[in-house]
Structures are given as C-alpha cells and as structure tokens.
Amino acid sequence: MNWRPQLQYSIFTVLLYMGIVCETFAFQAENYFLQSFKSQQQLITSDVTGRRIRLSAYAEEKNRDEYVTNSTVTRCRSTFCLPLSSDQIKFIATSKRSTNVLGKISRTLFFWQNFNSDDKTSTGTSVTFTYDYDLMKVGYDSRSSVLNTTGIVLIHPIGVGISKWFYERLMSSLATTYYEDDFSKQNQRKNRFLVIAPDLLGSGSACNATMYKTAAHSKPVEMKKYPLFNITDWTSQIEHLMEDVEKTHVINRCVSSPMVAVHPLHYKLLQTLPSNTPAKVKKSYRVLCGLPGNIFWWYACRNEGAFIQKFSEKNLVADPNNLGEKWRLNCYTNAKMNGGRSKYSTFAFLAGTLQDGCIESLRNLNGSDVCIDVIKGGDIRQNRARSWFWQRNKPKTEEDDDAVTVRPYASFRDYVEKNGNRGQEVVIGGRISLAHEDPCGYSRAMWNFLI
C-alpha cells in the first residue's frame, strides 16, 4: 500500500532560568523551514498541519482514558551517542595536560579538570548517554481508524535539579482535560497523540555518560565531568528520540516524519541582551567547572535545597503556593543524583551557550505564512537588582519597599507583528513556570491549538 500516515511532532518548551530549543532538525526537501522562538513564559509548538507555530503555556490533574487504559504514563529508556565537536574534543584533551604542581592546582580550583586524569589514552570522539523519558498515549481508540498521529515533545527547562519531572502535572492534566472538556469529541477520533517528556543531556537521568577511548584495549570510561553542551547537542538528542519512538510505537505503519526545524529565541534578546562570543562562553564554562561553580552548587543544595525554594518562590511563580509540596524535594533530589553531574548543563546555560542566533531566526520568518500564537502569564513582574552597590546613593521611594516591580514589555509582540507573523495572543494566570503553575489551563490551551 502507498498509504503513509504521518507521525507529526509538536515541540513544546518552557523556560525557567533560560530557554532552549532545537537548532537543526533533519527535514526532508518538501518540508519548509520553520523557525520559532521562546520567551521566559512561553511554550512553543507547531500544530498538526505544520503550518503554524504557537507559543503557549499551561496544565494539571490525573490521567483517564475512556476508550482504552493506555493513556497512563510509561517510563521508557533510550540511549544516545553524542558525537563530540572538534572544540569539545580539544577542550577535554587540553584539560589533561599538567606540566607542574602549580598548574595542576590551578586547573583543579578554577578550570576544567579531566574526568579521568590518570588515563593516558587519547580522547574519544563521542559520548554515550542512557536516559529515561516518559511516554503517554492520548486518544488511542482501537475501535476506530485514526488518520494522523501527532507526537508532542515536552522539552523541560535547564536549572538546578530540573528534569522531566517538571511536566508531571502537565502530562496528568493533558489526559484529564482531553476527555473531561470534550476535546475528544471535537477531535472526532481523527487524531491520536503521543506525549513524550525526555530528560535532556546533563539533566536528571541523563547524567551517566561514558566514553570509549581510541586505544586498542578501549573500555567504556565513566565521565565525571562533561564538556560544554550547546544547542545542537540537545537538538540531536531530541531528533534521535523522535526517530526511535517512530520505530517502536507506530506498529504496522509506514511512517513519514516531517521534522520541524526550530531555532531558539530568548525573550530579552529582542531588547538588550548581547550574544556571548564563543571565547567568552568557553572561558566562563571553565571557571564554573572549578571552584566558583562548586561553591554555587553547594550553596544551592545546602539545607536540602532551601535556596532553591526561596529563589523559586521569589522569581518563578506568581504565587508561592503554586510550587506545591514536591518542588523543593524534586529539585534537591535531582541535583544530588548521579554525583551532582547535572550541574554541568546548568553551568553551560550560565556560561551563555544559549544566547546566540535568535534574531536571525526571526528574520528568516519575514514574509512566510507562519503565524505565532502567544499565550503568556498574566504576572509580568520582573526582578530588580537588590545589591547594595546598585542601591547606594539613591533616594528611597515607596517602590523600593516591594521585592519586584511591574514593568510591561512588548518587544516580542511588536517584533512579531512587524515581522508579519503575529497570530492570536491570550493572557493566562501564572508568571514564568506556567506548565507547573497552572497545568489545567496549559493543557486546555494546547488542545485548543492542536485540535
């Protein structure tokens, strides 16, 4: 048969401390080049037609499937071999060199230290990660034929202790709202959905990397420290996972997967945030992998994550109660697991590896038929510097008594409108971590976009 049902993907991303998405997905010649972006409070998705990109945010509750019982979340495992770039190989190889005692101490305290300093073999060219991902089927009904399968990939933020658990509320609510809010009737069983939430490289379970040396007697060596992650590393992981899911979960089907090329956009880049040069990023990462980064990580995890809780309540949510009882425990547990190696993905973000190439991606959308629908949190407060240095010699006002101030910003909306790509805009509750704050509203927004 020539009938080829398509498994299409919707890419969802949310920001906490940063933003990441994919840089270059494989795509066929007939696929047009879609590019999208994200802000601190937006979620990106391309709908089932592949013709629109939506930025949204929201969702929560418990799964239920009226037709079959396979809408529950399944824990799966995948393996990804990350090819190292020449810079990453050079980065690791350079770190092995030690000429004197002072050099060894300096590298140990302030810069990158080799994952196995006693190993004399040459550096390998790839690193293998084994990681977990959650998978949930929604709208699967064995009693009727389904025309399309849409894969929804949830890409979690990068931060201290953040991994795929960030989407537990959302995945639960996606199943609930699909049936309780009549989205299943609107869908009329024409589409079924496969929701996937993976741990990104360097986060959660994806912190157990091994490297094979190039020597003849090569054996896998567990890496204690990781090279600098960049956007294409996470892109390659997600692309590989989608291809793997197609082979495993689309049974007795000849599947064609039109991949969407997605590029990152950090919200403030549209305003004043400068891009870091590669040299600055590498230097910052080396410093963070030494004593300064270790002190930061220790402080963040001390007292079972007290700092994480305080920071999150002040900066990430509209109402501290929205975090829930498990937020602090989840962040702390994930930050400590695998020897605390998830810190290296956070260090990569802090070094500025994600702050590049965004404006050009938006410009490429100019004149296209891609529309960008925005659903954002209603709480638009931005944190203000509280350092004594910035406040000294300044007259105190009533405004200074507040921890945060309200300062509206519309550069993203204005830019998209000027670019000819503006779609709908919906304001919802919440502040930054919207998928965790209001998962019910989040899921309803997603289904409205996809069905």
Image (tube, rainbow, N blue to C red):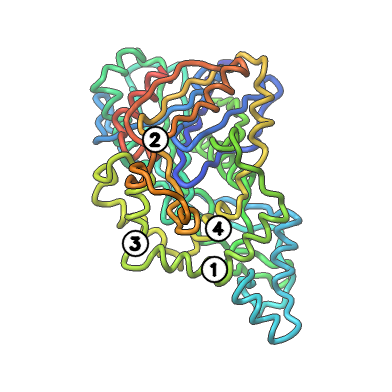
Give the label on residue 292, or none: 1
- x, y percentage for residue 33? 66, 24
Give the label on residue 305, or none: 3
Q: Describe residue 266's horizontal placement relative to residue 387 as left or right.
A: right
Callout 2 crowding tier (Cα within 10 Å): few <14, some 14–19, many ≥20: few
Residue type indicated by callout 2: Val
Q: Is tag 3's residue or tag 2's residue first in the polypeptide sequence? A: 3
Callout 1 crowding tier (Cα within 10 Å): few <14, some 14–19, many ≥20: some
**CA distance for labels 2 and 4:** 29 Å
Residue at left offset 44%, top offset 30%: 408
Instruction: Compare residues 22 and 221 and report the one nearer the observer.
Output: 22
- x, y percentage for residue 416? 57, 21
Residue type indicated by callout 1: Pro
Provide the residue designation for mark 4.
347
Q: Is residue 88 above or below residue 355?
A: below
Find out whether the residues at labels 3 and 4 contact each other: C-beta distance under 8 Å: no
Residue at left offset 44%, top offset 35%: 41
Q: Is tag 2's residue or tag 4's residue first in the polypeptide sequence? A: 4
Q: Describe residue 188's horizontal placement relative to residue 340 as left or right.
A: left
Instruction: Compare residues 369 and 118 and report the one nearer the observer.
Output: 369
Residue type indicated by callout 3: Gly
- x, y percentage for residue 356? 66, 41
* Image quadrant occupied by the N terminus: top right
Q: Describe residue 208's horizontal placement relative to residue 259 as left or right.
A: left
**CA distance for labels 3 and 1:** 18 Å
Residue at left offset 58%, top offset 64%: 288
Q: Nearer the viewer, mark 2 or mark 4?
A: 2
Provide the residue designation for mark 2.
406
Q: Nearer the viewer, mark 1 or mark 2?
A: 2
